[in-house]
Image (cartoon, rainbow, N blue to C red):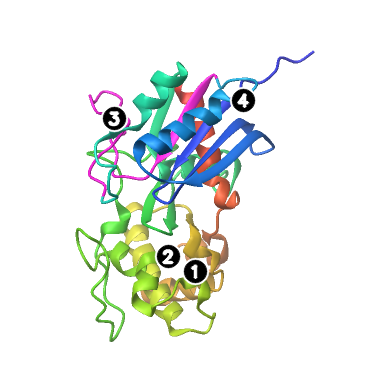
Amino acid sequence: MMDAKPLYGGIEAGGTKFVCALGTGPDDVRALTRFSTRTPDETLAETIAFFRAQPEPPVAVGIGSFGPVDPNPASPTYGYITSTPKAGWPHTDVAGAVRRALGVPVAFDTDVNAAALGEHRWGAAQAVDTFIYITVGTGFGGGGMVEGRRLHGLLHPEMGHIFVPRAPGDDFAGVCPFHGDCLEGLATGPALAARWGRPGHELPADHEAWVIEAHYLAMAVINFILTLSPERIILGGGVMHQTHLFPMIRETVQRRLNGYVQRPQILDAIDGYIVPPVLGDRAGVLGSMALAAEAL
């Protein structure tokens, strides 16, 4: 008889909601819950209660968190959310609280790096080792892998806070509390709602909002292609549920690159180069489960 696989806990710690899961992978999720992100004490208490209520506890937990965070295991603030604009959450020891409460090893990274790991293990990036994963939702996050290793460095990628060329005629001030009209300030769900007076999912597919949105996302993708040279780009998050954005982004990327990057993935097969996540909205929590294995 084959040995039972160990159970891993995954926590996708989002600024709007937390998703917690227990299992071995996408085909074996034993338990899953979602709940709104409230104060750190309330949210972490509900997270810990979920795992304590399971018949079999996890052998390790992985956390993919909104940020900025400290993902450096050698740092005294490893596992902390640091300078986030989310009220009440700056300098919160997320990983330490979970580790102390459950008594198991905990691995920690950004939510987008966790999602990238999930897509590399089970999804749209299985065939490549250098790629980026972008999420466009409440915030704008970017992560990924270079030659099979998750992107880190001085801190971690903050792709949402780059500055890109303005769409023609656009004078919207932006909503980023740090930078105003950076990419996150111009192209996230809150930016859409502030710009148009209603959330993006209420806007029809032929609304001018999507032409502007596709411009900013395409400009970002072009910058990332030219700086990181990824073998694939995965675009996820709530805004990308508007699937009509994909052909608009691909067309703009090809047109604006203007043949400069002479690779067939961009010139001839861009539908397979700029893609949605195979794991969909589960990429973050499943990637966090995959991250947990690194804690052992």
277 and 99: which one is in front?
A: 99
| Residue 216 percent across, percent down from the top left | 35, 71
Disc 3 to disc 2: CB gap under 8 Å? no
| Amino acid type shown at disc 1 | Leu
Residue at image mark 4: 54
Residue at 31% x, 38% y is: 152
Residue at image mark 3: 72
From the image, give the main secondary structure of the stretch colored magenta.
Answer: loop
| Residue 170 percent across, percent down from the top left | 28, 82
| Amino acid type shown at disc 3 | Asn
Instruction: Report helix, strand or loop for mark 1.
Output: helix
Residue 77 is left or right of residue 272, and the answer is: left
134 and 174: which one is in front?
A: 174
- Mark 1 to mark 4: distance in Å? 50 Å
Disc 1 to disc 3: CB gap under 8 Å? no
Residue at image mark 1: 267
| Amino acid type shown at disc 2 | Gln
Callout 1: few (<14), some (14-19), or many (20+) C-alpha neighbours within 10 Å? some
Residue 75 is left or right of residue 147, and the answer is: left
Residue at 59% x, 25% y is: 53
Q: Splitting the image into 4 quarters, where does residue 148 fall?
A: top left
Which comes before the other along the chain, label 1 or label 2?
2
Residue at image mark 2: 262
Magenta range = 59-84
Circle nearer the viewer, 1 or 3 = 3
Circle nearer the viewer, 1 or 4 = 4
